[in-house]
Image (tube, helix red, strand yellow):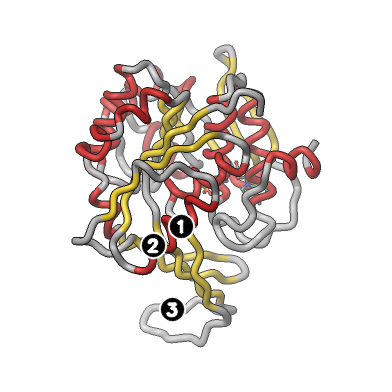
């Protein structure tokens, strides 16, 4: 990219503890799985890595504990070229983790948020400069809602647009729906927005990701659809995160909504061809080579 666009992410960071298995355990059942591995994850950090690999300048505001997972995750962010000045190390909480069970045709995830609960409004206040300097703010809902609302208020003051990835699924406060520039739910999360009385006024800000089917969005008041790319699927964990990081990087770079959705749809398709939420996140070069 010519004029390095800047994306600031206020969000979660976890260590993903991933077990692959042939058979999902039923209630009360223990099964012998196949492989175990740890992967850096958390929606915030995943989206930060996606945006950074695609050439954006990325600031991450978030928190880890003082344990070994926290140290590893901070080192990993730095290795990915992400500015960690906005990261807090909280001695009172463990680093967030996600327990992921992965079988051929299913995945089950449980998250223990830990230090992500310490991403509070005061941390964002300390990093106001980062928000002010950014072209776009990208948030998800794995940190306290009060922080998401507070960040939105600061970003509005500085006239920096906010992309909200309303994941995981939850009912959204009206203040949130009123202020964000774009919402990027998957089909399930979109249902929570459709139920809101504000739905008709924010419909045009919706970019709904539909897995292998692609993406639906609005352009010039009319609904548009871009189909998904046919790829060999290995692990869909992190597809939405790749989409969001890529979309934010493109919007920060001044792309139109169609250009940003088209690019993010291609980047996200490549991300599902490898194991691990971040494992398949492509570079800009890889997107250009594989999905011209
Ligand atoms: P989430 O991972 O948040 O549930 P989706 O499943 O909607 O989100 O996936 C996000 C985006 O990733 C899709 O809109 C699409 O661009 C891409 N994607 C996901 N699954 C596939 C797939 N099987 N083949 C191609 N692209 C995919």
How packed mark 1 is, by other alpha carbons closer than 10 Å (few <14, some 14-19, many 20 or more), is some
Q: Provide the residue designation for mark 1.
A: 75
Disc 2 is placed on an element classified as: helix
Marker disc for residue 112: none
* CB-based contact (under 8 Å), mark 3 and mark 1: no
Q: Position of residue 177 (x, y in %)?
A: 34, 26
For residue 42, side relative to residue 107 (left or right): left
Q: Where is residue 194 in the image (x, y as percent from the top left)?
A: 40, 31
Marker disc for residue 26: 3
Residue labelled 3 has its Cβ within 8 Å of some atom of ligand 1? no
* In the depicted structure, whether residue 286 falls above or below residue 262: below
* CB-based contact (under 8 Å), mark 1 and mark 2: yes
Estimate the spatial distance between the alpha carbons at disc 3 and disc 2, rounded to whole Å.
35 Å
Q: In which quarter of the image is residue 15?
A: bottom left
Q: Pick whichever of labels 3 and 2 is earlier in the sequence.
A: 3
* In the depicted structure, whether residue 138 falls above or below residue 253: below
Q: Pick whichever of labels 3 and 1 is earlier in the sequence.
A: 3
Q: Which of marks 3 and 2 is in front?
A: 2
Residue found 62% across the figure and 39% down from its top = 54
Disc 1 is placed on an element classified as: helix
Q: Nearer the viewer, mark 3 or mark 1?
A: 1
Residue 81 visible, this angle:
yes
For residue 213, side relative to residue 29 (left or right): right
How packed mark 3 is, by other alpha carbons closer than 10 Å (few <14, some 14-19, many 20 or more), is few
State how many labels appear: 3
Residue found 61% across the figure and 21% down from its top = 255
For residue 64, side relative to residue 247 (left or right): left
How packed mark 2 is, by other alpha carbons closer than 10 Å (few <14, some 14-19, many 20 or more), is some
Q: Where is residue 282 in the image (x, y as percent from the top left)?
A: 66, 47
Residue found 57% across the figure and 40% down from its top = 243
Q: Where is residue 125 in the image (x, y as percent from the top left)?
A: 24, 32
Q: Provide the residue designation for mark 2.
A: 71
């Amino acid at each position: 990219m010519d004029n390095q666009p800047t994306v600031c992410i206020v969000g979660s960071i976890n260590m993903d503890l991933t077990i692959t298995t042939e058979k999902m355990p039923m209630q009360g059942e223990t099964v012998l799985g196949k492989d175990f591995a740890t992967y850096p994850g958390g929606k915030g950090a995943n989206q930060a890595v996606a945006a950074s690999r695609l050439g954006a300048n990325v600031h991450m505001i978030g928190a880890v504990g003082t344990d070994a997972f926290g140290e590893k995750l901070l080192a990993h962010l730095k290795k990915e070229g992400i500015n960690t000045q906005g990261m807090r190390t909280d001695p009172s909480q463990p680093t967030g983790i996600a327990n992921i069970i992965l079988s051929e045709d299913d995945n089950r995830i449980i998250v223990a948020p830990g230090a992500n609960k310490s991403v509070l409004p005061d941390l964002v206040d300390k990093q106001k400069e980062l928000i002010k300097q950014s072209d776009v703010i990208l948030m998800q809902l794995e940190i306290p809602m009060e922080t998401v609302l507070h960040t939105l208020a600061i970003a509005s003051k500085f006239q920096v647009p906010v992309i909200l990835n309303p994941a995981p699924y939850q009912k959204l406060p009206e203040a949130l729906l009123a202020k964000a520039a774009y919402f990027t739910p998957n089909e399930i999360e979109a249902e929570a927005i459709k139920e809101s009385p504000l739905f008709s006024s924010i419909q045009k800000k919706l970019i709904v990701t539909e897995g292998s089917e692609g993406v639906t969005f609005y352009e010039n008041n009319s609904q548009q659809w871009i189909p998904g790319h046919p790829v060999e699927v290995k692990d869909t964990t992190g597809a939405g995160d790749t989409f969001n990081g890529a979309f934010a990087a493109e919007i920060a770079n001044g792309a139109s909504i169609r250009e940003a959705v088209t690019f993010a749809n291609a980047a996200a398709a490549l991300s599902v061809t490898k194991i691990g939420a971040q494992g398949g996140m492509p570079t800009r070069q890889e997107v250009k080579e594989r999905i011209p």
